[in-house]
Amino acid sequence: MKDVKFNLRAVRRSKKVTQIELAEKSGIAQQTLSLYERGLNTPLLDNAKILADALGVSLDELVSIREAHEQVGKKLIKLSKKGK
C-alpha cells in the first residue's frame, strides 16, 4: 500500500473530528492515528475500513486509488523501456 495515498487527515478534518474523537469511535489508538496521518505507518485494510466507517465515508474516499494507478503505470513504462 506504499503507492496508495492515505487521506486520513484531510477526511478527518473535513468531518470536523479530532484524532481523540476518532480514536474513541474507531477503537484505534490516537498515537496510531497520528502515525497514519504523518505517513509513518499505513493501516492494514481492516483498520482502513474501520476508519472509513467511523468517519462515515467509503474506503475509496479515504484512499486515493487513482494516484496509485498512475504511479504503477509510470513504473510499468520505466520497466518496459529498460527491456528494449
Image (spheres, rainbow, N blue to C red):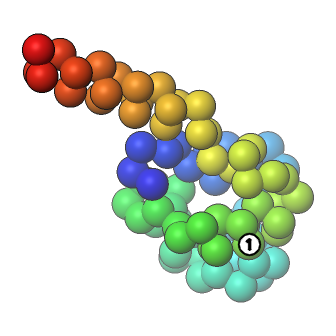
Q: Secondary structure at mark 1?
A: helix
- Callout 1: few (<14), some (14-19), or many (20+) C-alpha neighbours within 10 Å? some
Residue at x-position 22% and y-position 21%: 80
Reply above or below: 75 against 34. Answer: above
- Residue 12 makes an appearance in the image: no
Q: Which is nearer the eye, 66 or 54?
A: 66
Residue at x-position 64% and y-position 65%: 48
The picture places residue 39, in percent across and down from the top left corner, at: 43, 54
Q: Kindly give the residue lying farthest to the right in the view shown.
A: 56
Reply above or below: 53 against 65. Answer: below
The picture places residue 72, in percent across and down from the top left corner, at: 40, 33
Residue on which the image places disc 1: 50
| Amino acid type shown at disc 1 | Ile
The picture places residue 23, in percent across and down from the top left corner, at: 70, 77
Answer left or right for 78 relative to 16: left
- Residue 57 makes an appearance in the image: yes
Q: Which is nearer the eye, 72 or 33?
A: 72
For the C terminus, give its image quadrant.
Answer: top left
Residue at x-position 64% and y-position 74%: 46
